[in-house]
């Protein structure tokens, strides 16, 4: 019963303002169609009573009720957007109640004063009023006070007028009207209750959605902040790694006759080759963007194993003896084993160090299997080592050494072409020929 009285009074406070405001806005959206429908039916009521009641009274009644509707329309046009505050909602609630009560009573007392004498016309009138009551139940259920005021103002005078006749037919008809009134009141109440529950559920869902959105924003901010921190740490580790690689490679170069620019040139040679081959069907799977970047950063470690070669051999100005050359040929394994030992200390295999080991181990392997240290042949040689082999040989050819003069670019290209299919992968040679001018530019940019 408390729900019934709460809905009947349409009590509004700060706690239920959003729900009540939405009920009022829903009724305001229906208001024009309700008024138009009402104004269209009222002339039919006058026509029905035209031959029964004095015309001037019927026209006076119609004029008064049209003036009432005009007032409603003006109020709606001026204030229909004003449902934001508690005072505005209470004002509209009063408007709805007053208009509904006066309109319902105008219709109800109209039937009371213009009630026809013929039973058939009475039945027609009752049917028309029942239709208005049924429409009111569906259209006014958003605002229970207006609904009850309209329905009672309409039905009570009509029921009273029918029962006044005091015969069996009218008693039965009056009883039917009373039953209909009770059914309509109950239907309106339950329809309003259903609408109210739906609105409350909707606002609860919206509130939960806002809370979730707020929590999501906070979580997203924390994720971004944490991601930024991790990215900074990753960048720091990457920078430390790159600096360490260059430091180790430079340390190895200080024991050799190579210069620091040799490292920069070979880095850029191998990246240029990789970029040219990245769409080749035999190379595209390996030459991803990450792997190309790894090749560029790891190229300086190709001769890291030379730190294990004695100075007497490494720095010898003349030609090495067969025995000395055999010792020199161990530097790829020394470098590869050193990197493998570092890799073994990690909990899982590391792609970056794996490529470094391939380069250090395999950059002196030859396509026909005559290279060292393992005598790998053809595609058994890792792609990283095949690219490094060409980059290293090209730079060695164009560089001055104690034991030789530098080749020209053209001479170096001719030598490499002569060794296609023997020393070098023919497909890598094709890529080299396509970008040989880029090799020349790199050599000139980082010349000793």
Image: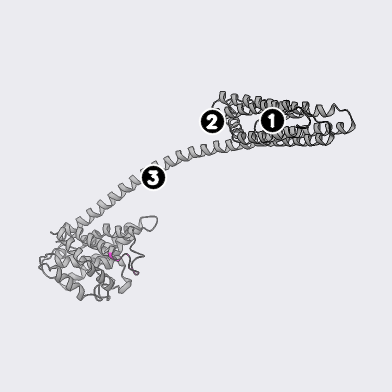
Quadrant assignment, res 435: bottom left
Q: Give the CA distance from mark 3 to mark 2.
A: 46 Å
Circle number at residue 227: 3
Packing grade of label 2 (10 A; few <14, some 14-19, many >=20) is few
* Residue 94 on image: x %, y %: 63, 24
- Image quarter hosting the C terminus: bottom left
Packing grade of label 3 (10 A; few <14, some 14-19, many >=20) is few
Main secondary structure found in the magenta portion: loop
* Residue 182 on image: x %, y %: 78, 32
Q: Is residue 166 left or right of residue 140?
A: right
Circle number at residue 65: none
Magenta-tinted stretch? 276-282
Circle number at residue 81: 2
Q: Nearer the viewer, mark 3 or mark 2?
A: 2
* Residue 354 on image: x %, y %: 33, 61
Q: Earlier in the sequence, mark 3 or mark 2?
A: 2
Rendering colour mode? one colour
Residue 204 falls within the magenta-colored stretch = no
Tell me the SS state at disc 2: loop
């Amino acid at each position: 019963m408390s729900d019934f009285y709460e809905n009947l009074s349409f009590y509004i406070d700060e706690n239920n303002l959003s729900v009540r405001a939405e009920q009022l806005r829903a009724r305001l959206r229906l208001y024009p169609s309700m008024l138009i429908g009402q104004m269209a039916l009222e002339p039919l009521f006058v026509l029905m009573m035209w031959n029964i009641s004095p015309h001037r009274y019927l026209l006076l009644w119609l004029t008064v009720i049209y003036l009432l509707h005009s007032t409603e329309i003006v109020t709606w046009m001026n204030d229909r957007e004003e449902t934001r505050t508690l005072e505005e909602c209470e004002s509209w609630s009063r408007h709805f109640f007053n208009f509904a009560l006066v309109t319902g009573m105008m219709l109800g007392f109209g039937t009371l004063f213009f009630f026809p004498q013929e039973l058939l016309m009475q039945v027609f009138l009752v049917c028309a009023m029942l239709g208005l009551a049924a429409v009111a139940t569906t259209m006014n259920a958003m605002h229970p006070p207006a609904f009850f005021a309209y329905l009672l103002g309409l039905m009570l005078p009509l029921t009273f007028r029918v029962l006044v006749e005091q015969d069996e037919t009218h008693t039965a008809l009056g009883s039917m009207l009373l039953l209909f009134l009770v059914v309509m009141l109950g239907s309106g109440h339950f329809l309003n209750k259903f609408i109210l529950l739906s609105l409350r559920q909707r606002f609860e869902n919206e509130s939960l959605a806002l809370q979730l959105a707020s929590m999501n924003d906070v979580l997203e901010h924390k994720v971004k902040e944490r991601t930024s921190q991790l990215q900074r740490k990753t960048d720091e580790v990457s920078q430390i790694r790159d600096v360490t690689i260059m430091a180790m490679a430079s340390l190895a170069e200080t024991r050799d006759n190579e210069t620091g620019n040799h490292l920069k040139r070979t880095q850029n040679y191998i990246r240029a080759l990789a970029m040219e081959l990245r769409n080749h069907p035999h190379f595209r799977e390996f030459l991803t963007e990450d792997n190309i970047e790894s090749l560029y950063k790891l190229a300086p470690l190709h001769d890291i194993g030379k730190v294990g070669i004695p100075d007497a051999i490494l720095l010898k100005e003349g030609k090495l003896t067969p025995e000395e050359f055999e010792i020199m040929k161990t530097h790829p394994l020394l470098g590869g084993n050193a990197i493998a030992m570092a890799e073994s200390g990690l909990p899982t295999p590391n792609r970056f160090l794996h490529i470094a080991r391939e380069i250090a181990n395999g950059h002196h392997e030859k396509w026909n299997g005559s290279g060292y240290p393992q005598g790998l042949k053809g595609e058994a040689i890792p792609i990283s080592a095949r690219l490094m082999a060409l980059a290293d040989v090209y730079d060695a050819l164009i560089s001055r050494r104690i034991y030789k003069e530098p080749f020209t670019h053209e001479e170096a290209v001719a030598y490499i072409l002569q060794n296609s299919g023997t020393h070098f992968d023919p497909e890598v040679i094709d890529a080299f020929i396509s970008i040989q001018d880029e090799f020349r530019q790199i050599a000139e940019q980082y010349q000793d």
